[in-house]
Image: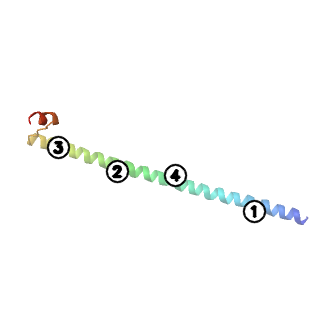
Amino acid sequence: MSLASKLTLAGTSLFALSTVIFVHYAQKAEKAAMHQGVIRDLESQRLKKERQQDFEIQSALETEYRKIQHVVTQNNDDHESTK
């Protein structure tokens, strides 16, 4: 086997091995990124649910307070016409 053929074989083998290693690490990185997306989505859903619960509590309190207190809303048009 000549020196040129040995170098060609070594070069192509090294290139093939490098390609396999690169693809392996790229797949691992992509999988990790996708997992982070799932974690982000779960956190987003948790926050949305928490905010909805807070809104419902505040809405119930507002309804309760409106029963107890007399609330008058004033429009700017009415206020300006009394001047």
For label 1, the crowd category at 10 Å Cα-Cα, with few meaning under 14, some 14 to 19 and many 20 or more, is few
The image quarter containing residue 79 is: top left
Q: Are marks 2 and 4 in contact (CB under 8 Å)?
A: no
Residues at marks 2 and 4, CA–CA distance in whole angstroms: 20 Å
- Mark 3 or 4: in front is 3
Residue ID for mark 1: 14
The type of residue carrying mark 3 is Glu
Outermost residue toward the bottom in this view: 3
- The crowd level at tag 4 (other Cα within 10 Å; few <14, some 14-19, many 20+) is few
Circle 4 is placed at which residue position?
34
The CA distance from mark 3 to mark 1 is 71 Å
Amino acid type for the residue under numbered disc 2 = Leu
Q: Secondary structure at mark 4?
A: helix
Vertical order, 79 against 52 (above or below): above
Q: Image height check: is 58 above or below 76?
A: below
On-image quarter of the N terminus = bottom right
- Find residue 47 and name its label: 2
> Which quadrant would the C terminus be assigned to in this image?
top left
- Which mark sits nearer the N-terminus, 4 or 1? 1
- Using a 10 Å C-alpha cutoff, classify the residue at mark 3 as few (fewer than 14 neighbours), some (14 to 19) or many (20 or more): few
Gap between marks 4 and 1 measured at Cα? 30 Å
